[in-house]
Amino acid sequence: MKKLIICLVFLTILTANTISAAAAVDKKIELNGESINLEDDEQIMKLKEEIEKKSEKEKDMIIGSTVIFLNGQENHIRNSESNLGCLITDAVLAKTKAEAVIINSRTINASIAKGLISMRDIKRALPAQDEIIIKEIKGSKLVEVLEHSISKYPENASFFPQLSGIKIIFAEIEGAANKILKVLVNSKPLKENKYYLIATNDSLAQGGDGFKKLAQAKKIKNSGRLDQIFKEYLQEKEIIEKVKANRIIAVSKVGNNYFYRIQKGDYLYLIANKFSVSVKKIMQANNLKNISLIYEGQKLIIPGLR
């Protein structure tokens, strides 16, 4: 019985071109031109070693490279946009041709350091082997999905989103639920009565992490495994030099005004671009006299948000 179990375990992890149905019946397989008897302990161990060698070799295969640190750290990715999250969702968008992509941050388990990227790095970052599912969802329901995804902010949450094709601006409101203020899909304002094709990981598609509206949305098709999609994207890109960001922007509401807290690296033109408002209007709303005199942590009123 023990020998039979061992044989079955190894048979399940062999690829389809390694073993034929006839070989399985004969309890023999061909491996690197040699006949392996699955009833022979010594040959079973040889088979195990060969599979482990092949697996390790595949993990060390170089897929691409990055000149920037790709942040997958839990304390970062579960309450803010991550460049690794952006890169992974961009890969899905490119592969599926969906209009937008949303995955939950728990999908990403590790960062990728500067330098060469191996298959081992990808498997560390995306260990779950999630399937990507395309769903069709009404715009008004998509807003509800997005509001759920930011509902715990600024606390860490495994369902905090990582996005591609979508830009959201949301408000943290003291004593009330966080609220989506603006959603852009492919740089255009979301239309509540329009239906959108959204790519997501299978756990969210099935309603995991509280995403009930995604579970109710119409399934269009499966689009492959997330780690393989990411692998192919990195191979095509070869070198990751930068990742476009500013897809998830948080503000706070005080009275009738919405305030943005200046982040490291922000400058006034960049902030104006984030909110699609002129520099002049921001300066007027905040009585700024010098375009350069802003600092990290400063709160600016953003005119026009409501």
Image (cartoon, helix red, strand yellow):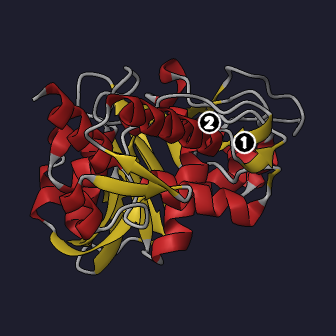
Amino acid identity at mark 2: Asp
Q: How far across and how far down the image is residue 41, in percent?
A: 33, 29
Looking at the rendering, which quadrant does residue 288 occupy? top right
Q: How far across and how far down the image is residue 291, in percent?
A: 87, 40
Q: Determine the residue positioned at 76% across, 52% down.
A: 279
Q: Determine the residue positioned at 37% across, 56% down.
A: 29
The front one of 275 and 264 is: 264
Q: How far across and how far down the image is residue 8, in percent?
A: 21, 42
Q: How far across and how far down the image is residue 298, in percent?
A: 68, 22
Q: From where the camera sits, is residue 130 visible?
A: yes
Looking at the rendering, which quadrant does residue 96 occupy? bottom left
Q: Is residue 14 positioned above or below 150 on the image?
A: below
Label 1 packing within 10 angstroms: few (<14), some (14-19), many (20+): many
Q: Residue furthest bottom?
A: 194
Label 2 packing within 10 angstroms: few (<14), some (14-19), many (20+): many
Amino acid identity at mark 1: Ile
In the image, which disc is placed on residue 121? Answer: 2
Name the residue tied to disc 1.
Answer: 117
Lateral position of residue 10 relative to residue 64, left or right: left
